[in-house]
Image: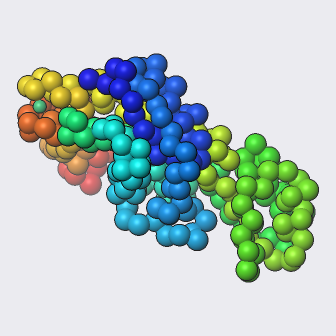
């Protein structure tokens, strides 16, 4: 379905470095990156432009805009978001999605990776020493920095002289530069999300053979290992085809630890 087709990748931050090798070798796609494609108009991490809509909508807009500019029927876009981990709010995490839109086959498939491996961080500093300490903690200079002053934002700071200069004016806010080309850790998570996309594309609907037959829902009620009462843990995952609606339930044969049981361990 994808072999030798041209897919336009909507990026201006060198995300093709993470995405293209995987899609080209695993799916046989040919990745094309449009020149002068301004993804910043869809929102920036440094907040000059607020992101329009949620993460998926933002990726969708980028992919469709790239198709409009370049033409064709296959587009890839990715979008990251940095927020506290859903289960461990003390841990910052990076959620990356890589979206494929195939207008020829009317398909939209989302690869995803959530990783606590991120240097996403910021600090207000008053001098170079403090800035230096922060920089060492977040993997500078391999990972670049952004300095936010009252009337100016300096992005892509990648060496010590630049950093010294940028923080010389007194109290400023130093942030990790989260743009993909300035953040190798983020690039790795984008690659993971791309591999997830490939896996989903390889999983086809048993009814109509459309790619992207993946978990769409879950059913809770995994039985307690002691008394068999249903717990709040996941009992079954439900794969669903977005094309024909065919569903398949995978029921777990595990038992829940009694610590999750409302009777054994209330
Ligand atoms: Zn189907
Ligand atoms: Zn129980």
* Left or right: 101 as drawn, with respect to 155: left
Give the answer, above or below, for where 156 lies relative to 187: below
Instruction: Where is residue 38? Give x, y as percent.
Output: 53, 56
Instruction: Where is residue 71? Give x, y as percent.
Output: 36, 43
* Left or right: 11 as drawn, with respect to 168: left
Out of 74 and 195, give the one closest to the viewer.
Answer: 74
Instruction: Name the quadrant containing residue 6.
Output: top left
The N terminus, quarter of image: top left
Residue at horizontal 41 percent and vertical 49 percent from the top: 69
In the rendered image, is residue 253 in sight? no
Instruction: Name the quadrant containing residue 4.
Output: top left
Residue at horizontal 86 percent and vertical 58 percent from the top: 162
Q: For ligand 1, which image quadrant applies?
A: top left
Instruction: Name the quadrant containing residue 14.
Output: top right
Residue at horizontal 46 percent and vertical 31 percent from the top: 31
Give the answer, above or below, for where 38 lies relative to 219: below
* Left or right: 215 as drawn, with respect to 156: left
Residue reaching furthest bottom? 150
In the rendered image, is residue 65 in sight? yes
């Amino acid at each position: 379905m994808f072999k030798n087709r041209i897919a336009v990748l909507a990026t201006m931050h060198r995300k093709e470095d993470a995405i293209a090798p995987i899609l080209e070798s695993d799916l046989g796609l040919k990745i094309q990156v449009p020149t002068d494609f301004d993804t910043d108009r869809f929102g920036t991490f440094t907040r000059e432009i607020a992101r329009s809509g949620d993460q998926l909508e933002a990726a969708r807009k980028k992919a469709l805009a790239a198709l409009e500019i370049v033409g064709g029927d296959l587009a890839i876009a990715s979008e990251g978001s940095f927020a506290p981990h859903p289960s461990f709010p003390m841990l910052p995490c990076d959620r990356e999605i890589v979206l494929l839109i195939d207008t020829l086959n009317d398909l939209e498939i989302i690869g995803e990776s959530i990783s606590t491996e991120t240097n996403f961080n910021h600090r207000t500093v008053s001098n170079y020493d403090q800035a230096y300490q922060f920089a060492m903690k977040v993997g500078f200079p391999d990972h670049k920095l952004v300095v936010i002053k009252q009337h100016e934002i300096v992005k892509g700071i990648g060496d010590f002289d630049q950093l010294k200069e940028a923080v010389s004016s007194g109290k400023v806010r130093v942030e990790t530069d989260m743009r993909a080309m300035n953040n190798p850790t983020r690039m790795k998570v984008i690659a993971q999300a791309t591999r997830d996309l490939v896996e989903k594309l390889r999983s086809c609907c048993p009814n109509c053979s459309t790619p992207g037959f993946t978990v769409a829902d879950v059913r809770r009620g995994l039985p307690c290992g002691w008394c068999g009462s249903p717990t709040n843990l996941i009992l079954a995952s439900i794969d669903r085809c977005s094309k024909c609606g065919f569903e398949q339930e995978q029921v777990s044969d595990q038992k829940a630890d009694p610590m999750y049981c409302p009777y054994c361990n209330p």
